[in-house]
Image (cartoon, rainbow, N blue to C red):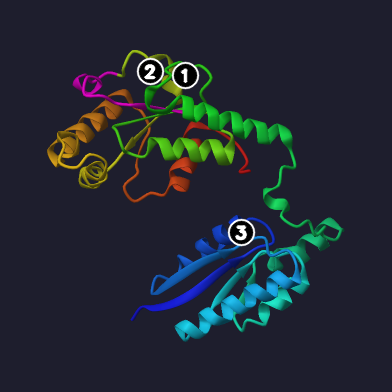
């Protein structure tokens, strides 16, 4: 029987680190429904006490002990959060002491450092990559000479969010090209893509899922019909096979997984920002 448990991602910064790690952990427990809330910028004891009250009230409301995924660096804040009665999990605790021993130095407790601008060169590379993804979205700009990767797929198969994710998190210059009906009439790559074959990666999707997505965008249209989606997906997959373009289905794959697979396949090596 499924149970419901409130979970709070508490941070002295944005909370992105706590939430990312927390999600990775909690997905391992599929018999529990988690009600998540991020509490960001808890950077002093007073805010921690207020957060603890909110967490305690949530536990009383649901009649169960809440969970707290905590990435705050100040031990006084962690102690204040513990007053909530929740199970408080410190995401950094298992790693800090072994690292301090190995590196021979104590950690420096920088609040919010994980997502601060600490390297302006990498920050600007990320912003430039984001601008590149936006200007090369859905074939708006077709000069791919500066692209690191060009995603190719039928409309609504997940090209744009994947390009944006790679740009924002890895500084990858990702363009995307939507296969049109005219493109799909042939079993060869469109002429504008052929010079960039080594940068191409194909995305496909289950036709039923594609029809659902398109129906939300254009209800009742030929574009959203299942028959249209089946034809387009089959033609795109045939094209990818004929041209030996590496391909991945986005139907049950997260953006993070798609991005990792694309970069690994094409040999793009970048650290996550």
Label 2's element?
A: loop
The quarter of the image holding the C terminus is top right
The magenta-colored residue range is 174-188
State which quadrant residue 158 falls in. Answer: top left
Task: Report how far apart the C-alphas of labels 1 and 2 lie in the structure.
Answer: 8 Å
Label 3's element?
A: loop
Q: How busy is the neighbourhood of tag 3: few (under 14 within 10 Å), some, or many (20 plus)? A: many
Q: Nearer the viewer, residue 88 or 60?
A: 60
Report if residue 174 is visible in the image.
no
The spot of residue 209 in percent (x, y) is: 24, 47
N-terminal of the pair, mark 1 or mark 2, is 1
Q: Residue at x 63, y 77 (%)?
A: 52
Q: Are marks 1 and 2 in contact (CB under 8 Å)?
A: yes
User: Label 3: which residue?
Assistant: 15
Q: Is residue 267 depicted above or below 208 in this figure? A: above
Per the rendering, the mark at residue 144 is 1
State which quadrant residue 180 falls in. Answer: top left
Report if residue 183 is visible in the image.
yes
Q: Is residue 226 depicted above or below 187 in this figure? A: below
Tell which residue pokes out farthest to the left in this image: 227
The spot of residue 4 in percent (x, y) is: 42, 77
Per the rendering, the mark at residue 192 is none
């Amino acid at each position: 029987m499924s149970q419901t448990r409130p979970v709070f991602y508490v941070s002295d910064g944005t909370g992105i680190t706590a939430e990312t790690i927390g999600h990775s952990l909690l997905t391992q427990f599929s018999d529990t429904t988690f009600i998540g809330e991020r509490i960001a910028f808890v950077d002093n004891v007073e805010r921690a006490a207020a957060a603890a009250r909110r967490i305690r009230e949530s536990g009383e409301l649901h009649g169960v002990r809440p969970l707290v995924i905590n990435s705050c660096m100040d031990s006084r804040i962690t102690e204040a959060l513990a007053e909530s009665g929740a199970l408080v999990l410190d995401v950094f605790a298992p790693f800090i002491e072994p690292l301090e021993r190995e590196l021979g130095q104590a950690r420096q407790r920088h609040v919010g450092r994980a997502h601060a601008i600490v390297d302006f060169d990498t920050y600007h590379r990320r912003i430039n990559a984001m601008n590149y993804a936006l200007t090369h979205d859905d074939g708006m700009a077709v000069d791919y000479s500066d692209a690191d990767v060009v995603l190719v797929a039928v409309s609504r198969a997940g090209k744009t969010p994947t390009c944006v994710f790679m740009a924002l998190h890895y500084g990858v210059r990702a363009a995307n090209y939507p296969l049109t009906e005219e493109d799909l009439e042939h079993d060869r790559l469109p002429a504008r893509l052929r010079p960039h074959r080594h940068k191409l990666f194909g995305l496909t999707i289950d036709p039923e899922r594609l029809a659902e997505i398109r129906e939300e965008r254009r209800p009742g249209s030929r574009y959203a019909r299942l028959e249209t989606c089946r034809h387009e997906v089959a033609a795109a997959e045939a094209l990818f096979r004929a041209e030996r373009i590496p391909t991945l289905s986005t139907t049950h794959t997260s953006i993070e997984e798609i991005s990792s697979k694309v970069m690994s396949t094409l040999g793009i090596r970048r650290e996550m920002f």
